[in-house]
Amino acid sequence: METIRFRHAHFSARFPVSYRYSPSHFWMAPENKSETIWRVGFTKFATRMLGELVEMVLDVTQQQSVASGQRIGSIEGFKAASDLYCVMEGRFVGSNPTLLSEACVTRSDPYVEGWLYAVEGIPEEGNLDVHGYIELLTETIERLHSKRSESVE
């Protein structure tokens, strides 16, 4: 898998070139060679902000229609808990069964084994290629550092 290395401040990661990315720090990639079923997972930046995944609870069922921005469940990590919103338009296919026994895989292997859920459909409008996501990430990290600097003064 071809990746692009990103480094900024104290954060470093590799991002798959062929994936699509949401402004909310999820990746989307076609499952195997399918053009209609997409897997969705956290980017490395999201896993850093969340910490180790402790629990994911989904409120959607297989074959249910889902839409971009729809709340589909909740997630809890060591550092944060949050609602989980869909970044796809289509039909919910299922969640990653590996997460039931090894939730830490979302952090150790976020782009292959650590996917969260799958949807048959298309990525949300406004999704980004790897270069657009890196640009967004740079702005996000700079904004976080700026806020941190202001609170120290």
Image: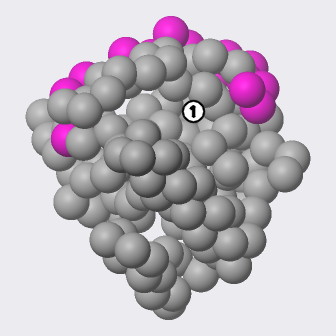
Examine the rendered structure and indicate whether residue 5 appears above or below residue 138. Answer: below
17 on left or right of 120: left
Decide which of 62, 101 is in the foreground and name it.
Answer: 101
Q: Residue at x 42, y 81 (%)?
A: 7
66 on left or right of 74: right
Which span is picked out in magenta? 52-69
Where residue 152 appears, x then y in whole percent?
36, 46
Q: Please give the residue where the numbered disc 1 appears in the rendered image.
A: 93
Q: Quadrant of residue 102?
A: top left
Mark 1 neighbour density, 10 Å: few (under 14) some (14–19) many (20 or more):
some
25 on left or right of 77: right
Examine the rendered structure and indicate whether residue 60 appears above or below residue 114. Answer: above
Where residue 18 appears, x then y in whole percent?
63, 77
SS under mark 1 = strand
Q: Residue at x 48, y 38 (%)?
A: 117
**Seen from this angle, which residue lies furthest right?**
125
| 8 part of magenta stretch | no
Where residue 137 appears, x then y in whole percent?
58, 64
Q: Amino acid at mark 1?
A: Val
**Seen from this angle, which residue lies furthest front?**
153
Q: Residue at x 60, y 26 (%)?
A: 85
151 on left or right of 72: left
Examine the rendered structure and indicate whether residue 68 appears above or below residue 83. Answer: below
Q: Residue at x 53, y 55 (%)?
A: 146
Decide which of 48, 100 is in the foreground and name it.
Answer: 48
Does residue 62 show up? no
Q: Quadrant of residue 20?
A: bottom right
Where residue 95 appears, x then y in whole percent?
42, 33
Does residue 82 show up? yes
Decide which of 61, 99 is in the foreground and name it.
Answer: 99
The quadrant of the image that shows the N terminus is: bottom left
